[in-house]
Amino acid sequence: MNQGQRYTLRDVYFWKISISLALASFFIFASIYAIQPLLPLFVEDYGISVSASSLLLSLTIIGLIIGLVIFGFLSDRFGRTIFIKLSLIGTVIPFILIPQIQSYALFMTLRFFQGILAAALLASALAYLSEEMDQKSVGVATGLYISSNALGGMAGRVFIGYVTDYYSWQIAFYLLGAIGLGIFIIVFISLPRSRFFNPSKLPIKHDFIGFAHHLKNPRLLVIFGLGTVLQLSFTGVWTYLPFHLQEPPFNLSLKFISYLFFAYSIGVIASPIAGWMVGYMKLTPMRIIAIIVLSIGAFMTLSSSLYIIVFGLCVLCLGFFIAHSLTATTVSEQATHHKGSAASLYLVAYYIGVASGSTLLSPVWSFLGWEGLILVSGLVPIIYVLFTQLVIKKYHAY
C-alpha cells in the first residue's frame, strides 16, 4: 500500500485500528455503566441514601462532560493515539484502587476522574478514524466502534452484576480492571501512529466561536435539548430499575437483574434500522414515532408481570436508540459549519441527560415510587416534543 493512501478494508492496519478501537470502546463504556446495577448494594454497604449512591454514575458522567471539552481541544493539537492509550490506562487504575478504600467520598472522587479520563477516547477515536481510513471504508470502522459502545455498556452491567452475585463487587472491580489492562496492552501494541494528523494551529478562541454560533441557533438548541430529555428518561428507568425489582413482589437477585441489561443489545440493530428508515420517511416524523415507542416501552414496565416488563425494556431500548440515532443525524444536517463543535455540544447535552436521569430523578423515586418515576420518564419526552413543535410553528424556527 502507498504511504500516501488511507487504509481500506483490504489493509491489515485497517483491521488493527478497527479492532483496537472497538475493544477500547467496549471497555470504556463497560467501565462507565458497570456501576448501575450495583447502586442498591452500595446503599447497604456504605449506609448512604439512594440519591448518594446515584452520584457514582452522575459524577462519572459530569467528569466525562468536562473531559470531552478538555480532550477535544488537546487531541486536535497534540494527536489522537496518545489520548486513546491514556484513556484506557487512566480508566483501569480506579478499578484497582477503589476496592481497597473505605471512604465513600474518595470512591466518588475516583469515579469522577475516571469519567474525565474515559472522555479522552471519545474525544479522539472518531477523528482518528476519519483521518486514517479511506472514505469508502470509514463507515465500517465507525459502525464497529459505535456498536461496541452499546455492547460495552450492556456487557459491563451484566458482567459486574453476575460476578458480584457470586463473589463480591470488589472482585468484580478487580476483574474488570484486569480485562481493561489486557485491552490496553493490545491497543498499545496494535494501534499504529497517526499518518494524516495535522495539528490545529488555530487559537482556542476559534473553537469557542464555533460553540457560541451553535448556541445561538434555535434549531440546534431544540435538538440539543431533545438529546438531554431522551437520555434523562432512558437513564432514569435503568438507574432505578434494580431498586424496583429487588422489592416485593419481584425480589429478584442482582444476577437476574443484571441479565435484563441484555435488552441493550437492541441498540446494536436500532441504528441500522434508523438508517434504513431515513430512505422512506422524513427525520422529524420518524423521530416522533421512535419517542412514542420509547414512552410505550417505559409504561409497559408498570406491569406486575415480569415478562411484560422485560418486553417493555426491549421496546424502550428500540425507541431510544432509534430516536438518539436520528437526533444525532439531525445535528449534522442543521450545522452548516463548525460541525465538530456541534457534534461535541450534542454529546455534552446527551451526557447531561445521563447525569440528570441518574440523580435528579432520585426525589421522584423516593416520594412517588416506580409509578411516579415512569410517569415522568414516559411523558417528559412527549411533552418536550409537543412543546417545541408548538414553539417552532409559532415562531417559524424551522
Image (cartoon, rainbow, N blue to C red):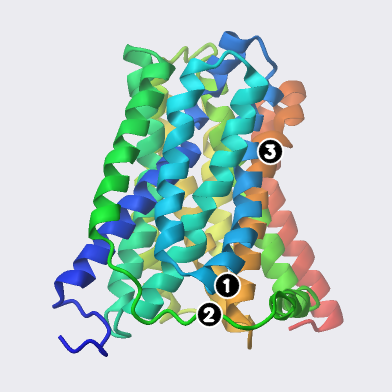
How far apart marks 3 and 1 lie (CA) works out to 23 Å
- The quarter of the displayed image where residue 288 is located: bottom right
In the picture shown, does residue 160 fall above or below 334? above
Badge 2 crowding class, 10 Å Cα cut-off, few under 14, some 14 to 19, many 20 or more, is few
Residue visible at 28% across and 57% down?
Answer: 20
Query: In the drawing, what numbered circle is on residue 125?
Result: none
Identify which amino acid the numbered label 2 is placed on. Lys
Badge 3 crowding class, 10 Å Cα cut-off, few under 14, some 14 to 19, many 20 or more, is some
User: Looking at the image, do the residues carrying marks 2 and 1 touch, with CB atoms under 8 Å apart?
Assistant: yes
**Image coordinates for residue 383, horizontal then vertical, percent:** 74, 55
Residue visible at 30% across and 36% down?
Answer: 179
**Image coordinates for residue 337, horizontal then vertical, percent:** 63, 87
Identify which amino acid the numbered label 3 is placed on. Leu
- Please report whichever mark, 3 or 1, sits nearer to the chain's N-terminal start: 1
Comparing 375 with 162, the one in front is: 162
How far apart marks 2 and 1 lie (CA) works out to 6 Å
- Tag 1 secondary structure: helix
Q: Which residue is mark 3?
A: 375
Q: On the rendered image, what quadrant is the N terminus found in? A: bottom left
Q: Which residue is mark 1?
A: 285
- Tag 2 secondary structure: loop
- The quarter of the displayed image where residue 6 is located: bottom left
**Image coordinates for residue 276, horizontal then vertical, percent:** 37, 74
Q: Is residue 314 visible?
A: no
- Please report whichever mark, 2 or 3, sits nearer to the chain's N-terminal start: 2
Badge 1 crowding class, 10 Å Cα cut-off, few under 14, some 14 to 19, many 20 or more, is few
Q: On the rendered image, what quadrant is the C terminus found in? A: bottom right
Q: Is residue 128 visible?
A: yes
